[in-house]
Image (cartoon, grey):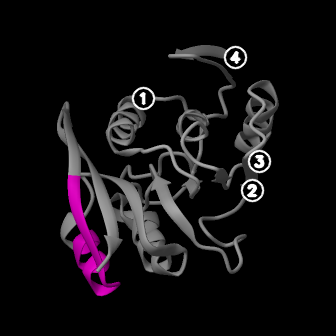
Amino acid sequence: MVQFNYKDFLLNLSKEVYPPLEDTFLMLDSLEKEFVKNDKSFLEIGSGSGIISLKAASFFKKITSIDIDENVINHLNLLKEKYSLDNQIIIQSDLFSAIEDEKFDCIVFNPPYVPSEQIEVLSTDGGEEGSEIILRFISQLPNFLKKNGVCYLLVSSHNNLDEIYFELKFNKLKFEPVSEKNIFFEKLIVLKISDQ
């Protein structure tokens, strides 16, 4: 068990839960600049440590946190109880598969983006060119994003960015980078996505 502090939050993370790293902090920094307190709905796909959903809970009326990993779901439920997040719903799901007929004002996804021959480590392995899960997410996104809603998606320069950008355009989504960070031999980029 590892303890992690972020501002007002203290997280106890087991080895099965992806810890906050540079990608998480870049996303958090981006969201802090973008979030406005409102009565809208928020969805985080791949919640991992839960720190992004915790941050969002003070801005949005309804928070939905999704992860494919049962260990993460157990961790999120402990956080929900610890911080009395009455406005949070926690769902075990592969991307949007467990959500029916619901759309969200804001969707955040810090995906598994590391290029890998096979997807073995759910929290990091993104498949071929690290883009496999990202492309699946984009193809489903329009069905779950409200009109005038916004999505924040993290991608890496190690991904096939041309293919990702093509998939966004194909699904009639407009996008722009809102923040970037160079780490060793890669660049992390947070994209702000909306309907055209």
- Helix, strand or loop status at disc 2: strand
Residue 52 in the image, given as x and y percentages of width and height: 52, 38
User: Three-letter amino acid code at disc 4?
Assistant: Met
- Helix, strand or loop status at disc 1: loop
Can residue 123 be seen in this snapshot?
Answer: yes
Q: Nearer the viewer, mark 4 or mark 2?
A: 2
Mark 2 or 3 closer to N-term? Answer: 3
Count of labels in the image: 4
Mark 4 or 1 closer to N-term? Answer: 4
Query: Residue, x 31% and y 84% (percent of image)?
Result: 172
Q: Which residues are magenta?
A: 163-177
Say left or right for 94 vs 5: right
Q: Label 1 to label 3, Cα distance in Å?
A: 21 Å
User: Three-letter amino acid code at disc 2?
Assistant: Ile
User: Three-letter amino acid code at disc 3?
Assistant: Glu
Q: Nearer the viewer, mark 2 or mark 3?
A: 2
Asked if residue 144 is positioned above or below residue 10 in the image, the reply reads below
Can residue 157 be seen in this snapshot?
Answer: no
Q: Label 2 to label 3, Cα distance in Å?
A: 10 Å
Say left or right for 148 vs 69: left
Residue 160 in the image, given as x and y percentages of width and height: 24, 64
Mark 1 or 2 closer to N-term? Answer: 1
Report if the CB atoms under discs 1 and 2 are less than 8 Å apart. no
- Report which residue position mark 1 lands on: 21
Asked if residue 106 is positioned above or below residue 50 in the image, the reply reads below
Query: Residue, x 72% and y 70% (percent of image)?
Result: 98
- Report which residue position mark 4 lands on: 1
In this view, the residue farthest toward the front is 38
Mark 4 or 2 closer to N-term? Answer: 4
Disc ID at residue 70: 3
Report if the CB atoms under discs 4 and 3 are less than 8 Å apart. no
Q: Label 4 to label 2, Cα distance in Å?
A: 23 Å
